[in-house]
Amino acid sequence: GAVVSQHPSRVICKSGTSVKIECRSLDFQATTMFWYRQFPKQSLMLMATSNEGSKATYEQGVEKDKFLINHASLTLSTLTVTSAHPEDSSFYICSARPPDQPQHFGDGTRLSIL
Amino acid sequence: DAKTTQPPSMDCAEGRAANLPCNHSTISGNEYVYWYRQIHSQGPQYIIHGLKNNETNEMASLIITEDRKSSTLILPHATLRDTAVYYCIVRASGGYQKVTFGTGTKLQVIP
């Protein structure tokens, strides 16, 4: 069964809206989670590393004020796309690593900004 | 993480073995070879990983060359549901290291 759960699976909203995506580790604690973005016909691009109890680490070129990450508990990380615009439309995916296992990925969130 | 090179696309007849190659000539001694696949509009799915020995599980087999500079993922009897993008990734195991994706191989299983 799934070990990493994302919610919602799909979001459609108007330009200027802020959208929050949740990533949960199921049955294990994850002090670190990762957020990726994937545009059509492209590979996954790492956006940031989410660290429980501390600030996220963002990859070069990713705006930290645009993509707010909160990792307030050992099983939940959230990504908030602030004031979303059509160019933020993408497939957002999170991942976490259960103990003694490889990274597992959520099923992704399809974000469409109108 | 060491860089990997994969062919952009491959076709395979249904029921036949699919052999997906990956080059990782700069792999370090402590780096593992991981394979994931991504079916359309889903998150990546872990398939298999190995260090230097060949590995097999219920999904696939992984053959790593003796010099560890390349590997092959084998799906023994491909089905239509195996149509996906397959990613070969090299990284050290342990800790909380990020997974960096290359462009992968788009495998099309043909009826």
Image (spheres, rainbow, N blue to C red):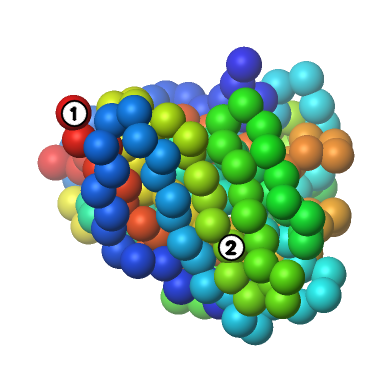
Residue B63 position within the rendered picture, expressed as x and y whole percent measured from the top left = 63, 55
In the rendered structure, the answer to whether residue A44 lies left or right of residue A6 reads left
In the rendered structure, the answer to whether residue B82 lies left or right of residue B44 reads left
Query: For the view shown, which residue lies furthest in the top direction?
Result: A1
- In the displayed structure, B72 sits above or below A112; it is below
Does label 1 or label 2 sit earlier along the sequence? 2
Query: Few, some or many C-alpha atoms within 10 Å of disc 2 (few <14, some 14-19, many ≥20)?
Result: many
Amino acid, disc 2 = Ser
Residue B110 position within the rendered picture, expressed as x and y whole percent measured from the top left = 20, 35
Name the residue nearer the viewer: A17 or B47: B47
Residue B97 position within the rendered picture, expressed as x and y whole percent measured from the top left = 74, 60
Q: Which chain carries label 2?
A: B
Name the residue nearer the viewer: B35 or B61: B61
Name the residue nearer the viewer: A55 or A7: A7
- In the displayed structure, A29 sits above or below A65; it is above
Q: Do the residues labelled 1 and 2 touch (CB within 8 Å)?
A: no
- In the displayed structure, B48 sits above or below B23; it is above
Q: Which chain carries label 1?
A: B
Amino acid, disc 1 = Pro
Residue under label 1: B111
Query: Measuring 34% from the left and 28% from the top, which residue is drawn there?
Result: B15
Residue A91 visible somewhere in the drawing: no
- In the displayed structure, A14 sits above or below B34; it is above
Residue under label 2: B71
Residue A70 lies in quadrant: top right
Query: Measuring 31% from the left and 47% from the top, which residue is drawn there?
Result: B107
Query: For the view shown, which residue lies furthest in the bottom direction?
Result: B26
Quote the CA–CA distance across marks 1 and 2.
27 Å
The quarter of the picture where the N terminus of chain A appears is top right
Residue A4 visible somewhere in the drawing: yes
- Give a yes or no on whether discs 1 and 2 share a subunit: yes
